[in-house]
Image (cartoon, helix red, strand yellow):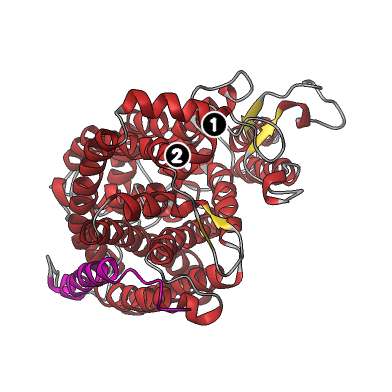
Amino acid sequence: MSLDNVQWTELIVFTALFLVVSVMGFVASRWKAGDTLEHLDEWGLGGRKFGSWITWFLVGGDLYTAYTFVAVPALIFGAGAMGFFALPYTVILYPIVFLPLLRMWSVSRVHGYVTPADFVKGRYGSRPLALLIAITGIVATMPYIALQLVGLEAVLRTMGLNGSGFLGHLPLFVGFLILAVYTYQAGLRAPALIAFVKDTLIYIVILVAVIYLPAKLGGWSTIFDKSAELLSAPGANGAPKGSTLLTPNNQLQYATLALGSALALFLYPHSLTGILASKGRKVIKKNMVALPAYSLLLGLLALLGYVALVSGAKPITNAATGRPDTNTIVPVLFDQQFSGWFAGVAFAAIGIGALVPAAIMSIAAANLWTRNIYKEYMRKDATPQQEAKQAKLASLVVKFGAVLFIVFVDPQFSIDLQLIGGVIILQTLPTVAIALYTRWFHVWGLISGWVAGMAYGFWLLYQIPNPAAGKAHFGGSALTLDKLTLFGWAPFEGSKVQIYVGFVALVVNLVVAVVVTLVARKLRKPNGTDETNPEDYHADEGDPKLKPVAAH
């Protein structure tokens, strides 16, 4: 890695802000501290006492990640209108999850649940089903953490730290070593405190960019016209690269991807972690109303993909793979159009935007490992102190697993893996979300549906090629309807209309779950024991039914 191309002003500003945030991470262990951090309620859920503002920054920092800030504009830069699926998905998300999240918070506080798998075990009395949900959550979260590193590496690469081999990844190792240490020490309080800085920086950077850059490039009207012209030009395969409007073939994909992503987001363990850390139902209600403000920011950010296209920005070639890295488009745009110090602030916002969700995701995965695998199958008599220590160690393993993933696997593959992660986590919807309202489904039905949805989803993903990346399989999540077959029957033969694989797999999951449930009920098979009561789903702050925080 040569230092000749390093943008020193940007790097110094970036490093200074990164160090400020790191100090905050270490200080966080004493912020809003309880009697002890040696309990998952305190280390993994911040004492379950975050108010409206802290929860807003924490959940927003968790859902709107560094990858979002680099990948959504990059998708619009490369394909056009399809990239805007992220906007309706984050708009319809909050009305969909408003009531289920209130019920999840209440039942979790009454029974002391830390993870969604804890709830499943309590609701169905089934250890195998809870284990299935825990493993699904961990597997779906891992590539998501790796993707935060993709965003961070895109920034480092733009600042000139673009080497191959171990030295090329050294800055990433240092950044994640610091993250690992302060997360180990402070738990969820660290990303909660840092989220304030991250979101403030992001808002400043985006608002300046969407006002200044269009004025510099001739206004939004010129940008849209030129983008339409550039996207309609033929690509490497002779077809247009994209379009500023949806086409008849990708409208269904757009709608199902937006809906499927909205249904999936709060099934991820890290999304629920932020909700379970809040102190009451009123806090969650306020947040579900206020969080769409981030969607406004996301819409403005997405438009930077068109700005980059018109400005003539070109992706930086990844020295490790030898291929252009489209995730560097927004950093390159900032590098070319802004002064060094402001670009450094922007890069710090994206870099810190990687740390906050990566920390929360690693904590959520560690909680699942500790509560639903380690304690359930390895050490049933584990004390709260032993649980907390196990979770801390697991969070380190998860983080460094993600770093190694980036070092040894093509980053483009991790993006594809995250799309697969969405298909995976959607298969927990009947067991986690629907179970908040009814126990009609039988345990056998839920397990059978999970297996069917997962198997069919992976089979469909396997059939999707990506000629641009030279892949014959697992090339994305957009499936043409002509590949939808059932035991040799192809109902949409010849159709080039695309659909989101996760949506199809979820439908299969639900159909199988219903059929097997009806059979199991007919055979009068036992359906586990429910330890929850109807009133548990409505308990609120101050209710005597709530389990005391950090109780043994």
Residue furthest to the top in view is 248
Q: Which residues are magenta?
A: 1-30
| Element type where label 2 sits in the image | helix
How far across and how far down the image is residue 516, in percent? 68, 35
Q: Which residue is mark 2?
A: 309
Identify residue type, mark 1. Answer: Leu
How far across and how far down the image is residue 451, in percent? 68, 46
Q: Find residue 302 and report its image quarter.
A: top left
| Element type where label 1 sits in the image | helix
Which badge, 2 or 1, comes first in the chain's sequence?
A: 1
**Circle 1 residues within 10 Å: few <14, some 14–19, many ≥20:** many
Report the magenta stretch's main SS.
helix
Q: Find residue 500 and report its image quarter.
A: top right
- Marks 1 and 2: in contact by CB < 8 Å? yes
Q: Which residue is mark 1?
A: 231
Q: Is residue 396 visible?
A: yes
Residue 261 higher or lower than 394, as above or below? above
How far across and how far down the image is residue 307, in percent? 38, 38
Q: Is residue 324 left or right of residue 265?
A: right
Front residue (pair 321, 195):
321
Identify residue type, mark 2. Answer: Leu
Residue 129 higher or lower than 352, as above or below? above
The span from disc 2 to disc 1 (Cα, nearest Å) is 9 Å
Which residue is pictured at 34% across the width and 43% down the height?
104
Front residue (pair 524, 406):
406
Locate the C terminus by quadrant: bottom left
Q: Is residue 172 left or right of residue 94?
A: right
